[in-house]
Amino acid sequence: MPIPIASLLLLLPLVVAVTVPSSRVVAADAVPQPRGFYINCGADKEVQVGSIKWVPDTAFIAVGNASKIDKPNILPIFSTLRHFPDTTARKYCYTLPAVKGSRYLVRTTYFYGGADPPIFDQIVDGTLWSAVNTTETSRRGMSTYFEMVAQAQGKSMSVCLARRPDTKASPFISTLELVDLEDSMYNTTDFGKYVLTTVARSALGVKGDIVSYPDDQYNRYWAPFTDGNPTVESHSPISPADFWNLPPARALKGGITTSRGKNLTVQWPTLELPLASYYVAFYFQDPRTASPYSWRVFDVAVNGKDFFRGLNASAAGVMVYSNMMQLTGKTEIVLTPNATCPVGPLINAGEIYQIVPVGGRTITRDVVAMDELARSLKNPPPDWAGDPCLPPQNSWTGVNCSPDSPVRVLSLDLRNRTLSGSLPDSIGNMTGIQTIILSCTKLSGPIPDFSSMQNLTALHLDGNQFSGPINPSLGKLINLRELYLNNNNLTGQIPASLLTKPGLVMRIEGNKLD
């Protein structure tokens, strides 16, 4: 039974870029197709790698250019990429269908295929995830992947790339994965407030390459790890269902151990950790054939502090975890055996994630309204995908938002852009908006009902092709001070509520009004 150990400190996230050869997939065997999406960026057709079918990315993104990589002996999924040369966009976003409240493993993989790759940011929904710097791995001909566990806050999830001040070339991406996890997995984390960024996931006592085991239905990558301690292989049947987080049985088949009566000391992970809070999970399983003597009892300590006392690693196995553990620097795991234990302690696998606060989310009604507006427009700005307000430095072009929670859209300014299309009725749901400037575009159709926008002070729809009558709802806007409707195709009479509205500057010439 897993037992939590609580501590709390949240600072800057550590994001680990893991490298693997570009010519060999990290799945050593065929992996059953897990739930979710496996996207081959820049591809023009489906490709099969093992049992996983990778689909082209055109259904998930509307911007960017596809390129091919001419390198011998590389995997099909690394033979193409999508890059984003448009310097006017604040971010470039993939939008993937999701189930609100469900938990997902997000994985991005990068293989540049040449020298001097760009440095850029990656964003999940409104959370700034990390910088992507693959300079060193590109020189070695390696691919690099990043992982996060996050919860869908709506009916879709966005994974975006964004330029940094030091980005010279176009951001790029090779593959994108969104794997649907079970609700029980990593469920001690409050995913409404935090995300988990992968630091390390290892099968201990195993040599070789990073692999995705065929019995891991979530296609997690497990890195091998050995040190100077003896290793052992299990001969007992292992059921993943007996463990929280459902690790694959193959990942628990090996282990690191030591002699009877000795402490087992393991330094894992090998990298130094910044001072922060982490989710840590350890997996233990007695490798001997189940019998009355197939048990091991020992205490678990991390960096000199108790993690779990009196752990009994039976043949059935056990997992222990901490969901808010403060760590810094090197991590040392010490297993101290019970004085009567007939064999030495052992450890089979481990996972560690940094706990990172969610970057926020624009209020749902504004997100829905902005998404519908984007679909109603032809040729919207190239960065109109993902969260419209967050991160603040990567908000949509022409969109200004409130700085504090709840995040609201405050203004919309797309004047003099080559737009067409119409304004959906749902635009009126953005009740926090104060100014709308859509002058000199080619918008058409009727003027929608703005009566819910009681904070609206300026509405500039001049120089378009709006038709029909002036919507009388405009006269109900108590704070409206500027109404520019000139040079459209409006007909009918001017509502009396506008003609008598004090303090209103109204321009209506260039229409077909009575």
Image (cartoon, rainbow, N blue to C red):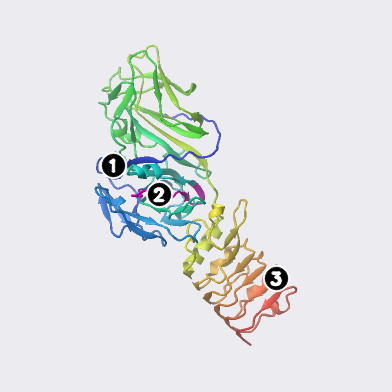
Residue 350, picture quadrant: top left
Callout 1–callout 3 Cβ contact below 8 Å: no
Task: Identify the secondary structure beneath mark 1.
Answer: loop
List x then y, in percent, for residue 451: 63, 69
Question: Badge 3 is on which residue?
Answer: 481
- Up/down of 366 relative to 221, above or below: below
List x then y, in percent, for residue 178: 38, 49
List x then y, in percent, for residue 397: 54, 62
Residue 117 — which label?
2
Task: Identify the secondary structure beneath mark 2.
Answer: loop
Which mark sits nearer the N-terminus, 2 or 3?
A: 2
Q: Residue at x 41, y 39 (%)?
A: 185
The residues colored magenta run 111-128
Which mark sits nearer the N-terminus, 1 or 3?
A: 1
Question: Badge 1 is on which residue?
Answer: 27
Please say whether residue 15 is visible from this viewpoint.
yes
- Closer to viewer: mark 2 or mark 1: 2
